[in-house]
Image (cartoon, rainbow, N blue to C red):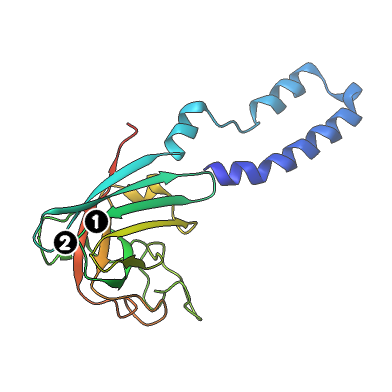
Amino acid sequence: MLKPFLIAAPALALAACGHGHHGHEMHGEDHGEHMMHTPEVSAAQLVKELARASASILGADGKEIGQARLEQGRTGLLIRMEIGAGGLTPGWHGLHLHETGDCSDVGAYQLSGGHHGKETGAHGLMNPDLGPEAGDLPNAWAAADGSAGYEAFTMLTQLVPALGADGLSIIIHAAEDDHRSQPIGGAGARVACGVVTRTDG
């Protein structure tokens, strides 16, 4: 992955300095072997890691209430969401990434599965013992007219592996997440769902 490569780079630089000091002792064959084992990150791998995705957010009646965009950066995942007027009840709403990309059971949204990276007792950004889970996110605030603008950056997950074979979804809950209690921070029913779909090929 990209992050381990960056961590390893300084070590490789130090090793190169060491070989330079004894440059007269390195034969051509040794030099070739040394270069062959140097890790490289191809342009294709970088594109794969720095992926983009989107989600159409469906309300309790299955109609679209907004859109979300997800973009993987070098150190984390940026999520931006816009909900139109009337989309949510005013106030705070829990927001999580869920382990399955399925919003077909309109209104219930249980087919989206549990939280991405779910682990018993680990829910909550402010969990004092375990966690947080990879799918934990800050709450979203809806205005008096039910609209909402949301942006969050999480270092808990990476988009490409999170999408996986079963996909990924964004779930909005009826109430706010207290970020501590189990299993979902008291956030209540699932009132909106969006299937995350990769958009960069």
Q: Quadrant of residue 2?
A: top right
The percent coordinates of residue 182 (x first, y second) are: 35, 81
* Secondary structure found at label 1: loop
Mark 1 is on which residue type?
Answer: Thr
Relative vertical location of residue 72 with respect to residue 144 in this rendering, above or below: above
Q: Is residue 23 at all visible to an observer of this figure? A: yes
The residue positioned farthest toward the top in the image shown: 28
Mark 2 touches mark 1? (CB < 8 Å): yes
Q: Residue at x 34, y 67 (%)?
A: 141
Q: CA distance from mark 2 to mark 1?
A: 7 Å
Q: Residue at x 61, y 33 (%)?
A: 39
Relative vertical location of residue 101 with respect to residue 19 in this rendering, above or below: below
The percent coordinates of residue 49 (x first, y second) are: 46, 39
Mark 2 is on which residue type?
Answer: Leu
> Which label's residue is closer to the chain start, 2 or 1?
1
What is the number of the mark on residue 111?
Answer: 2
Q: Quadrant of residue 113?
A: bottom left
Mark 1 sits on what residue? Answer: 100
What is the number of the mark on residue 199?
Answer: none
Q: Residue at x 73, y 37 (%)?
A: 12
Residue 53 versus residue 158: which sits nearer the camera?
53
